[in-house]
Image (cartoon, grey):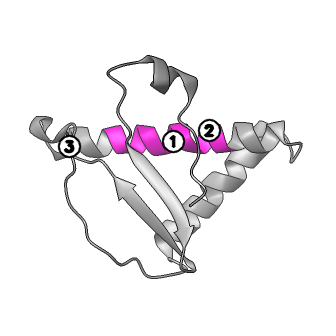
Amino acid sequence: MDALAPPPAAVRDANALELARVWIAEQGLHCALRVGLYAGDGVSRETNAWGIILADLAGHVADALSAEGMGARTELLDAVVERFNAEIADPSSERSGEAGTSVG
């Protein structure tokens, strides 16, 4: 397995929490998620938090692609968001696996 190292801030912070791991394995996408951190505050708080997390992640992807010389950050972010919305509307593949809350 070729895993990424945690970012320096996560290593320094004793209270850091890993929220997601994503792999390409066996010709498919596989995820481990920590959900439920905001569940006690209601579904809308949990979904709002994940919306922010996904938006921030998209911004980091655009930053990384831009740093690799693949284009301007704003154009790259627009392309990622466009594809995200298209994938939500019409998924290119089925999701499978177990879902559950992982808080701890």
Where does residue 104 sit, x and y in percent of width and height?
19, 39
Q: Which residue is mark 3?
A: 103
Q: In the image, is residue 37 above or below residue 47? A: above
Helix, strand or loop at disc 3?
loop
Decide if residue 37 is on the left or right side of residue 53. Answer: left
**Residue 11 among magenta residues:** no
Q: Which residue is mark 1?
A: 55
Amino acid residing under circle 2:
Gly
Q: Which residue is pictured at 42% across the width and 61% down the height?
A: 31
The answer to whether residue 56 is above or below residue 20 is above
Q: Which image quarter is the N terminus in?
A: bottom right
Quadrant of residue 85 within the rendered picture: bottom right
Q: Which residues are magenta?
A: 49-61
Residue 7: percent from left, percent from top = 56, 30
| In the displayed structure image, the side of residue 63 where residue 10 appears, left or right | left
Q: Amino acid at mark 1?
A: Ala
Q: Residues within 10 Å of mark 1 (few under 14, many from 20)?
A: some
